[in-house]
Image: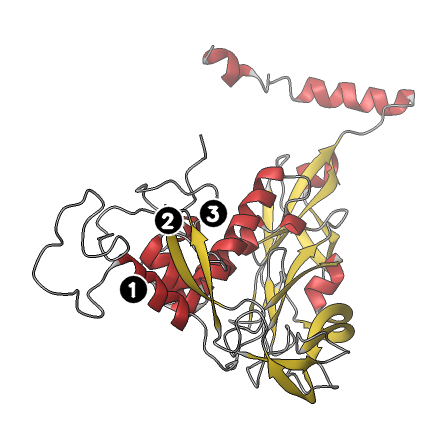
Amino acid sequence: MPSKQADHYETLGIGREASTDDVRKAYRRLARKFHPDLNPGDKASEDKFKKLQEAYDVLSDDKKRKMYDQFGFYSEQGFPPAGARPNAPGGFGFGGFDFSDIFGQEGPAGGAHRGAGPRPEGDGGFRDLFSNFFKNRQSHTRSAERGSDLEYALNIDFWQSIRGTQVRLTINRQETCHSCAGSGSSGGGSSTCAQCNGTGNVNQMAGAMRFSLTCPRCGGTGKLSSVCASCHGEGRITQPEAVEIRIPPGTRTGSRLRVAAKGSAGLMGGADGDLYITVRVDDHPFFHRDGDDIIIKVPITVTEASLGAKIEVPTIDGRSVLKIPMGTHNGQRFRLREKGVLNARTNTRGDQLIEVELTAPKAQDERTRELLRELAALHPDDPRADIWKQV
């Protein structure tokens, strides 16, 4: 039994009244979460990303969305996909349609057509509905079309993310064909389309029903232009291009950078798409980032913890002095104000948190062992006493 078609609105997590801008925002938010480059080896994320792309392709295009909203599916040929079930939610249903205009003035069972006289034009019959939809689904002239956006993943190291950098990235993007200026035609004249005989429409049978569809060969124009040899009629060609990407200071894993007009070129004067870069930052051996704060673990001796001391600790700006108070415990944290990462949006810096780790002295000689025994005699308290009280 074929599976139910996925609801594109549910896939993007939006309502049917969502605007084109809402569709775009929902897609970008979810694409960032499930992008295969950010989830390597995750088959579920890869499948989810493909569904997001399919949903966005349909709902971001006004003509495709119109068909999807009316019939529950989108197909270039005008027929439901294999997974769509008649009368199912999101599927292709015939319920509620009047088939009498296909079978003549009598219904399929031989009964008289309701009402006297011929059916008025545009009465909403099945054939009129589909014929009008597919006749008008494509304009007879190619209209301006915005280029698609491109998504790339970029790895940078820890210091590049902290200080910012400039990265040169080579991408493959569709550019306007210079040979035909994006028209797809060589300009060598045109001829009548043999498939539709110049009408722009072709008839297609589906059982006892006949559909009038836009001619797939000429796109509904009725004419065939001489195809550009460089782009094969596409109006665009794919070429590599080097793009300079500015990584601002404070960039973190998951940050998404936009480079305007560096996506695929538009068609027929349409605007170019944008390039989106999703950043992944490599780990540092001992600096760990938490938001705009930097966390680091620093070892100290027992005597430094007991007597107090001033020690040097590394920061992302270099060395800083940290005062260790007397009686410091293992795991205790100290804060260096404004020694963290610069937030480019607020122009403020986070803090650096230093967690101290006590290191025991190595008793490799008798003198050291003697001093430690004297220390134990001076402080015979059991540090585990509180634990035993609670057992």
Instruction: Look at the picture and state if 329 lies above or below 350.
Output: above
Residue 337 image-quadrant placement: bottom right
Asked whether residue 327 is in view, the answer is no
Q: Choose between 176 and 79: the one closer to the eye.
A: 79
- Which numbered disc, 3 or 2, marks the residue that appears first in the sequence? 3
- Provide the residue designation for mark 1: 128
Give the side of residue 261 with respect to residue 30, left or right.
Answer: right
Q: Residue at x 52, y 54 (%)?
A: 54
Q: Residue at x 52, y 49 (%)?
A: 51
- Provide the residue designation for mark 3: 81
Classed neighbour count for the residue bearing mark 2: other residues with Cα under 10 Å, few (<14), some (14–19), many (≥20): few
Q: Which mark is residue 208?
A: 2
Classed neighbour count for the residue bearing mark 3: other residues with Cα under 10 Å, few (<14), some (14–19), many (≥20): some
Q: Residue at x 22, y 69 (%)?
A: 122
Cα separation, mark 1 vs mark 2, equals: 15 Å
Q: Residue furthest left?
A: 116
Q: Secondary structure at mark 2?
A: loop
Q: Choose between 226 and 283: the one closer to the eye.
A: 226
Q: Could you tell me how many numbered marks the image carries?
A: 3
Q: Nearer the viewer, mark 1 or mark 3?
A: 1
Q: Nearer the viewer, mark 1 or mark 2?
A: 2
Q: Quadrant of the N terminus?
A: top left
Give the side of residue 109 with respect to residue 57, left or right.
Answer: left
- Which numbered disc, 1 or 3, marks the residue that appears first in the sequence? 3
Give amino acid for label 3: Pro
Asked whether residue 347 is in view, the answer is yes
